[in-house]
Image: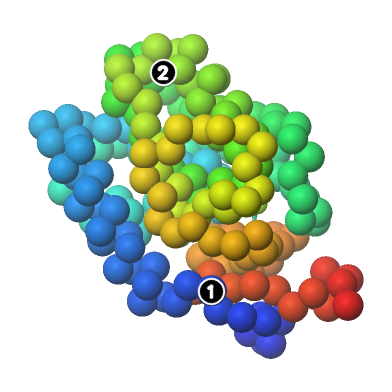
Amino acid sequence: MLHQDIAEILITEEQLQTRARELGADISAAYADRAPLLIAVLKGSVMFMADLMRELQVPHAIDFLATSSYGAATESTGVVRILKDLDDPIEGRDVLIVEDIIDSGNTLDYLRTLLLARNPASLRIVTLLSKPARREVDVPVDWVGFEIPDKFVIGYGLDYDERYRNLPYIGVLKPSVYGGE
Ligand code: IMP
Ligand code: MG
């Protein structure tokens, strides 16, 4: 059982669905008469992307890119690598980066610079979660689902060592799971 490893549920399935609906409405309004390209950052953003795109009222395309993850660590190293690039050029497109969580900000800062260099018509960012207390780099974010405290969270796409992505809520792991007290 996965649930026995969870110390606390931070955001319930219902709260996540409600927020995806709200963000979908806001983002649809912002892109009225446009057809944005949603770029999800693998793998943590897949559930959020799937829910968000179902709430969009504007035509849109999707693409994916992957950056190096922390592996089994729960702290950012500050070093970002592209593991999988986009399928198509983004020049002249209205790009929306779909992120799972902003922690230090290093990943998004790197991606933003990388994608801006490809001359999109516009570049905006939506993140499901943000840990403001952990920010090292200031990244302009257009939409934030939830601001959360400085805790390592899992579920709804987010993993610890590739596990727990399937949980329908955002939870906090018991420290014993990653060798804490
Ligand atoms: P940043 O570069 O420090 O902002 O880290 C961003 C990436 O680290 C996210 O896209 C996640 O994949 C991962 N990450 C950061 N915090 C957490 C967490 O609490 N749980 C799971 N993954 C996290
Ligand atoms: Mg991860």
Q: In what element is the residue under mark 2?
A: loop
Residue drawn where x is 56% and y is 33% of the image: 138
**x 45%, y 47%: residue:** 127
| Colour scheme in use | rainbow
Q: Compute the Cα span from label 1 to label 2.
A: 38 Å
In the image, is 153 to the left or to the right of 34?
right
Q: Quadrant of the C terminus?
A: bottom right
Disc number for residue 10: 1
Residue at which label 2 appears? 89
Amino acid at the residue labelled 2 = Pro
Q: Which mark is residue 139?
A: none
Q: Is residue 142 left or right of residue 60?
A: right
Amino acid type at circle 1 is Leu
In-image side of 173 versus 126 (left or right): right
The answer to whether 53 is drawn above or below residue 123 in the figure is below
Rendered position, 54 above or below 135: below
Residue 60 position in % (x across, y down):
25, 38
Q: Which of the image's four quarters has the N terminus?
A: bottom right
Say above or below: 71 vs 20: above
